[in-house]
């Protein structure tokens, strides 16, 4: 089995794991954020939890990428820049913007997220810097251009949605409120929608099995949480907008 073949097999294993994850999360919401609850063992402050959990996706990805034979080629460098545009922010900026005083995350969740991010970062970085075949013409290929456009759109959706959530606590008040503005007009979780669009764009731009596996896993992980969050909003706020969907405007 070649190196590329082993990455394909690992990608299919990740897709299968995503299918199982979807089934589990439809019944049990991961215990952090609004769904935090006791019984999951030792915890870590949320800000530090996010940094630890996401660090393999920024630091580990770069390390694996730099070990690849094609690390200096134009197309792999462009894909590296796309990946890091999300994960440098998610690892080192997003946690510092959190206003969740006293919020904590179980080490069990941090550990599972850390392990997934190690595997996912290795798969995707190894593919684009070693196993994949990207010549300079790939930068003008319709798949790459469409993928970048999707990624940018998803990134913008995600950033705007996060900013709206942060603004709800700008006055220092605790607790949860109903967010408005942007895609919150139509869905409860545009932040999750943005990430799904982002990594669908990545899968298209990279045109790889690891990219596809990550896009599938992103959906299977975030769609159930969006449904749980949507249900929580409806149960918590009597005046919650009745026409909002959970994740996809007018559909889901």
Image: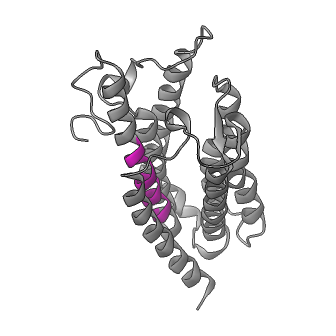
The residue drawn where x is 71% and y is 29% is 96
Question: 138 or 126, which is in the foreground?
Answer: 126
Q: Position of residue 15 (x, y in %)?
A: 45, 68
The reply to whether the magenta stretch includes residue 160 is no
Query: Does the image show residue 52?
Result: yes
Query: Does the image show residue 141?
Result: no
Q: Position of residue 110 (x, y in %)?
A: 66, 50
Q: Position of residue 207 (x, y in %)?
A: 47, 65
The residue drawn where x is 43% and y is 50% is 28
Picture layout, residue 230 above or below residue 185: below
| 62 left or right, relative to 151 | right
Question: 68 or 195, which is in the foreground?
Answer: 195
- The outermost residue toward the bottom is 1
Q: Position of residue 227 (x, y in %)?
A: 34, 41
The residue drawn where x is 62% and y is 57% is 112
Q: Which span is picked out in magenta?
A: 212-225
Question: 141 or 146, which is in the foreground?
Answer: 146
| 32 left or right, relative to 98 | left
Picture layout, residue 166 above or below residue 170: below
Quarter of the image where the C terminus is located: top left
Quarter of the image where the N terminus is located: bottom right
The residue drawn where x is 67% and y is 23% is 101
The reply to whether the magenta stretch includes residue 224 is yes
- The outermost residue toward the front is 39
């Amino acid at each position: 089995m070649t190196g590329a073949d082993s990455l394909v097999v690992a990608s299919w294993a990740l897709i299968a794991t995503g299918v199982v994850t979807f089934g589990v999360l439809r019944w049990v919401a991961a215990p952090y954020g609004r769904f935090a609850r006791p019984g999951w063992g030792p915890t870590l402050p949320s800000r530090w939890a996010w940094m630890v959990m996401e660090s393999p996706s920024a630091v580990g990805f770069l390390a694996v990428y730099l070990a690849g034979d094609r690390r200096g080629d134009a197309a792999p460098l462009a894909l590296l820049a796309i990946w890091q545009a999300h994960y440098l922010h998610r690892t080192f900026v997003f946690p510092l913007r959190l206003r969740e005083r006293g919020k904590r995350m179980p080490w069990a969740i941090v550990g599972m997220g850390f392990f997934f991010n190690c595997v996912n970062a290795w798969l995707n970085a190894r593919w684009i810097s070693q196993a994949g075949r990207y010549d300079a013409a790939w930068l003008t290929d319709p798949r790459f251009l469409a993928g970048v456009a999707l990624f940018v759109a998803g990134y913008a959706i995600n950033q705007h949605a996060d900013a709206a959530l942060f603004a709800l606590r700008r006055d220092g008040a605790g607790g949860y409120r109903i967010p408005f503005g942007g895609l919150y007009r139509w869905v409860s979780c545009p932040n999750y929608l943005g990430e799904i669009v982002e990594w669908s764009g990545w899968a298209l731009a990279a045109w790889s099995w690891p990219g596809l596996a990550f896009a599938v896993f992103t959906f299977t992980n975030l769609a159930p949480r969006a449904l749980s969050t949507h249900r929580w909003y409806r149960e918590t706020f009597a005046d919650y907008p009745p026409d909002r969907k959970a994740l996809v405007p007018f559909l889901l």
